[in-house]
Image (cartoon, helix red, strand yellow):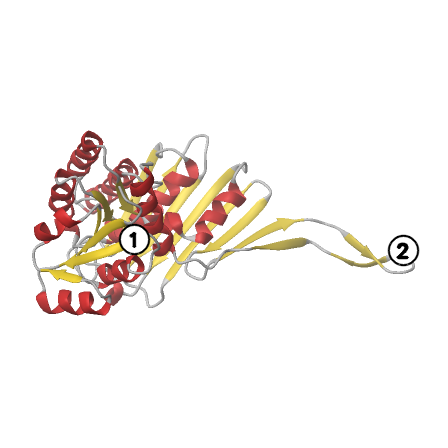
């Protein structure tokens, strides 16, 4: 491959436009075009980012080394499979597919074709989560609480809230703990759609932490937070505002000039430096680097498969419990 990765985008929705914006500005990347069935929207995005609009994605594929798929979830499997069959490296937005069986087939196809298959679990590239992993490395984790809340009008209603929002935190939990949970309990409510709109999942490990994941698309406030209780530390990570605080209990005494106690400090708060990088830029740069260098992605098809499998278990348990 020559130095510049020729990339295309399938899907001209909100996420597809973001992909175009970032790809148009990445070094050693050429944004060849965007494909979408909506001619008006696709043409507008193409003009905005100085690229070419393709009404049919099949006409775009022969021009590409790599593609990002930001279409609706039901279209992920067919589109990704077509791209891989044509020898094009793929980044597909989460969830990787609608079903675990489809995800397994995509993983096998990418391996057979020796192509990069990356899944858009963008929070893995969030600088706040990256720093959280650094802080918790080597600590004994006791409890992890994850909150991902959104107003209904900003949510993706192609899928339930588990596959739309909670799947991010399920993926992060798998990344933090490094294993699938041994036990799982889940509860949910339906309000604005026929699917689950509000969900709570409890994941437990015999020799690991208790993980509680809260996901809702019916709140009036957007929240993306992780709280970690570890041996010797309480850690707060705000993924939205890119901050990490570490609380530690300590009892130093500060003396005055007469060697008597002036005051006593009961705890300290460490404010961890979090670089202000855009997660999507880091994600797409990583993808194109993997394509260029032939290296495996940080969030592989197998990672997307594991996150989807866990999300399916959560959703199934909620439905079974309501029955």
Where's residue 12, x and y in %?
18, 61
**Residue 200, relative to residue 305: is it above or below?**
below
Q: Label 1, on which residue?
A: 29
Where's residue 315, x and y in %?
23, 45
Residue name at image x 50 percent, y 40 percent: 142
Q: Nearer the viewer, residue 82 or 125?
A: 82
Where's residue 221, x and y in %?
36, 66
Q: Is residue 162 left or right of residue 238?
A: left
Q: Secondary structure at mark 1?
A: strand
Residue name at image x 66 percent, y 53 percent: 267
Task: Work out whether residue 104 can be spotted.
Answer: yes
Residue count near mark 2 (Cα–Cα under 10 Å), binned few <14, some 14–19, many ≥20: few
Residue count near mark 1 (Cα–Cα under 10 Å), binned few <14, some 14–19, many ≥20: some
Q: Secondary structure at mark 2?
A: loop
Q: Nearer the viewer, residue 153 or 293?
A: 293
Q: Quadrant of the N terminus?
A: top left
Where's residue 275, x and y in %?
49, 56
Q: Is residue 1 left or right of residue 270?
A: left
**Residue 202, relative to residue 48: is it above or below?**
above
> Which circle marks residue 200 in the picture?
none
**CA gap, disc 2 and disc 1:** 64 Å
> Which circle marks residue 259 in the picture?
2
Number of labels in the image equals: 2
């Amino acid at each position: 491959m020559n130095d510049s990765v020729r990339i295309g985008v399938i899907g001209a929705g909100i996420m597809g436009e973001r992909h175009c914006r970032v790809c148009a500005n990445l070094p050693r990347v050429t944004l060849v075009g965007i494909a979408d069935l909506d001619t008006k929207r696709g043409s507008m995005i193409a003009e905005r980012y100085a690229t070419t609009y393709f009404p049919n994605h099949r006409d775009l594929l022969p021009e590409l080394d790599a593609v990002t798929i930001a279409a609706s979830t039901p279209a992920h499997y067919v589109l990704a499979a077509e791209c891989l069959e044509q020898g094009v490296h793929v980044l597909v937005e989460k969830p990787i597919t609608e079903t675990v069986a489809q995800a397994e087939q995509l993983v096998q196809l990418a391996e057979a074709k020796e192509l990069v298959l990356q899944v858009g679990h963008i929070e893995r590239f969030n600088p706040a989560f990256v720093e959280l992993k650094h802080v918790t490395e080597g600590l004994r984790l006791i409890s992890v609480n994850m909150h991902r809340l959104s107003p209904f009008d900003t949510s993706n209603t192609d899928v339930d809230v588990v596959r739309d929002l909670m799947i991010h935190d399920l993926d992060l939990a798998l990344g933090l703990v490094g294993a699938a949970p041994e036990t799982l309990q889940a509860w949910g409510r339906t309000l604005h759609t026929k699917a689950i709109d509000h969900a709570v999942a409890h994941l437990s490990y015999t020799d690991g932490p208790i993980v509680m994941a809260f996901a809702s698309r019916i709140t009036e406030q957007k929240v993306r937070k992780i709280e970690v209780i570890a041996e010797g530390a309480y850690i707060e990570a705000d993924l939205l505002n890119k901050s990490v605080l570490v609380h530690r209990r300590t009892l130093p005494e500060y003396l005055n000039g007469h060697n008597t106690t002036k005051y006593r400090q009961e705890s300290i708060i460490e404010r961890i430096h979090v670089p202000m990088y855009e997660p999507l830029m880091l994600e797409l740069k990583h993808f194109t680097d993997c394509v260029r260098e032939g290296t495996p992605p940080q969030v592989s098809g197998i990672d997307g498969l594991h996150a989807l499998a866990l999300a399916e278990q959560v959703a199934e348990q909620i439905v079974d419990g309501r029955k």
